Image: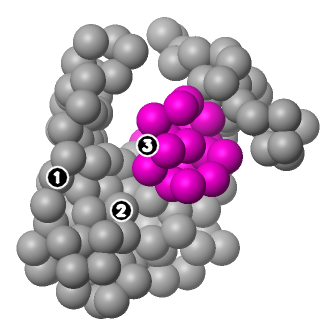
Amino acid sequence: MSEFKGGCLCGAVRYACSAEPVWSGNCHCRDCQRISGGGYISTLFVPESSVAITGEVKYYDKNGDSGQRVRRGFCPSCGSQVFGKPEIIPGVLGIRAGSLDNPELYRPAMDIYTASAQPWDFMNPDLPKFPQLPTT
């Protein structure tokens, strides 16, 4: 997956990444449920310096349960959420798996915040599960 591209629904925001993901997972916290309109958000994290972004990205900031800010980047034209920037992991950019040109490339490593998962949300039984954010 060393080089991949993606963007928002309308195409106004595009990105290209030249690095392998350093982490990936499905987050089942209530914030991710609300912003996705579903059971979870699938995200892969890469060094922010490895991503070239074109188009205007707007950010919505909210403190996470760590007390640190999470910035969620979206296209101001179509509203698609494309990026996440958790302050708890500086220098890393989260890319929403659904925004990939080829979403089949996404390989989740774990499910997090499973304590908030909805009963109708089927989770892959082969992935490690964490009731909150893992600390190690």
- Which amino acid lies under the numbered mark 2 shown in the image of this protein? Gln
Quadrant in which residue 49 is drawn: bottom left
| Residue 110 numbered tag | none
Are circles 3 and 2 on residues that touch, CB within 8 Å? Answer: no
C-alpha separation, residue under disc 3 versus residue under disc 1? 22 Å
Residue beneath disc 1: 59
C-alpha separation, residue under disc 2 versus residue under disc 1? 9 Å
Question: In the rendered image of this protein, does residue 41 appear above or below residue 104?
Answer: above
Neighbour tally class for label 2: few under 14, some 14-19, many 20 plus, Cα within 10 Å: many
Secondary structure under the numbered disc 2 in the rendered image:
strand
Would you say 35 lies left or right of 104 here?
A: left
Q: Residue furthest bottom?
A: 11
Quadrant in which residue 126 is drawn: top right
Residue drawn at the location 61% of the way across and 28% of the way down: 112
Most foreground residue, 19 or 98? 98
Most foreground residue, 11 or 119? 119
What scheme was used to colour the molecule?
A: one colour
**Of tags 3 and 2, which is closer to the observer?**
2
Across and down, in percent, residue 75 comes to: 24, 71
Residue beneath disc 2: 81
Quadrant in which residue 118 is drawn: top right
Residue drawn at the location 50% of the way across and 11% of the way down: 136
Decide which of tag 2 and tag 1 comes sooner along the chain: 1
The residue stretch that appears in magenta: 21-43
Decide which of tag 3 and tag 1 comes sooner along the chain: 3
Residue drawn at the location 55% of the way across and 55% of the way down: 37
Across and down, in percent, residue 2 comes to: 44, 67
Residue beneath disc 3: 22
